[in-house]
Image: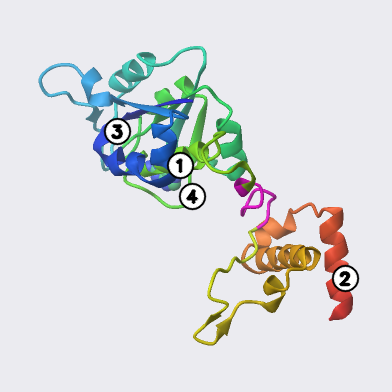
Amino acid sequence: MKITVLTLFPEMYENFLKTSIIGRSIERGLAEVEFVQIRDFAPGNYKHVDDTPFGGGSGMVMKCQPVLDALDSVKTEDSYTLLMSPAGTPYSQAKARELSKKDHLILLCGHYEGLDARINKHVDELVSIGDYVLTGGELASMVIMDSVIRLLKGSIRDTSTDEESHENGLLEYPQYTHPADYKGDLVPEILLSGNHAKIREWRVLQSLRLTEKVRPDLYAKHEFTEEEKKILKKFKDCE
Ligand code: 6GU
């Protein structure tokens, strides 16, 4: 997969792209990341990429010409372009899965108060990573790159993404590692039992209960599997 980032601040990505799973995936050639400096497409000596908003108001707005010329310089028939925007569609694990199948992603990052709205019709989608405001789209684009690259075949063990939080619409069950007794705080005994069927049952129940408690919104729209229904019934009868 190729990822092209359009930004005024490519230096923000340096450590991110070198580190851990993302760094290794890029080193292995699973993803190729390139940057386009939007300012290179601004004319004259001043290289202005922004201007004051029509109608008045505070802040500056990024201009159509440098942004769209930068976009045109990298866009092909195979490209899928995302504009980072707090006014976009909420980003999700399902969207990450969908994007991980694309050949070429273009991530367009605005700064200041935003981009001229006429730019919107030149992209495939506006995405937001959450209900808060960032100073620019760069951090959001890193969130998207991280969540997509780790799903590429060969990035991490294939099975390790299957049971994660959000893959099945639920939060993941709690995990523990050695020691089994940390200053008197004990790991749930069932996990030491070696009984895989019972462990599986416990994990499914924990996942359901945790989601119900901290993410009632997810729980309300969850479609229960037969296994989940059976486990819920069993433990309800015990209470
Ligand atoms: Cl994608 N961009 C900006 N600037 N702020 C955000 C965002 C994106 N998602 C949430 N807040």
As helix, strand or loop, the secondary structure at mark 4 comes to: loop
Q: Amino acid at mark 3?
A: Val
The percent position of residue 207, horizontal first and vertical second, equals 69, 63
Q: Which residue is mark 3?
A: 61
Residue at image location 23% in from the left, 27% down from the top: 49
Magenta: main secondary structure: loop
- Calculate the distance from the C-alpha at mark 4 to the C-alpha at mark 2: 37 Å
As helix, strand or loop, the secondary structure at mark 3 comes to: strand
Mark 4 close to ligand 1, CB under 8 Å: yes
Task: Mark 1 or mark 3: name the one nearer the start of the chain.
Answer: 3
As helix, strand or loop, the secondary structure at mark 2 comes to: helix
Q: Which residue is mark 2?
A: 234
Q: Which residue is mark 4?
A: 130
Name, please, the residue furthest toward the left.
Answer: 45
Q: Amino acid at mark 1?
A: Asp
For label 4, the crowd category at 10 Å Cα-Cα, with few meaning under 14, some 14 to 19 and many 20 or more, is some
As helix, strand or loop, the secondary structure at mark 1 comes to: helix
Q: Is residue 200 above or below residue 72?
A: below
Q: Amino acid at mark 2?
A: Lys
Q: Quadrant of ligand 1?
A: top left
Q: Quadrant of the C terminus?
A: bottom right
| Image depth: mark 1 or mark 3 in front | 1
- Calculate the distance from the C-alpha at mark 4 to the C-alpha at mark 3: 22 Å
Disc on res. 146? 1
Quadrant in the rendering for residue 201: bottom right
Residue at image location 80% in from the left, 63% down from the top: 197
Magenta region: 160-170
Q: Is residue 217 above or below residue 152?
A: below
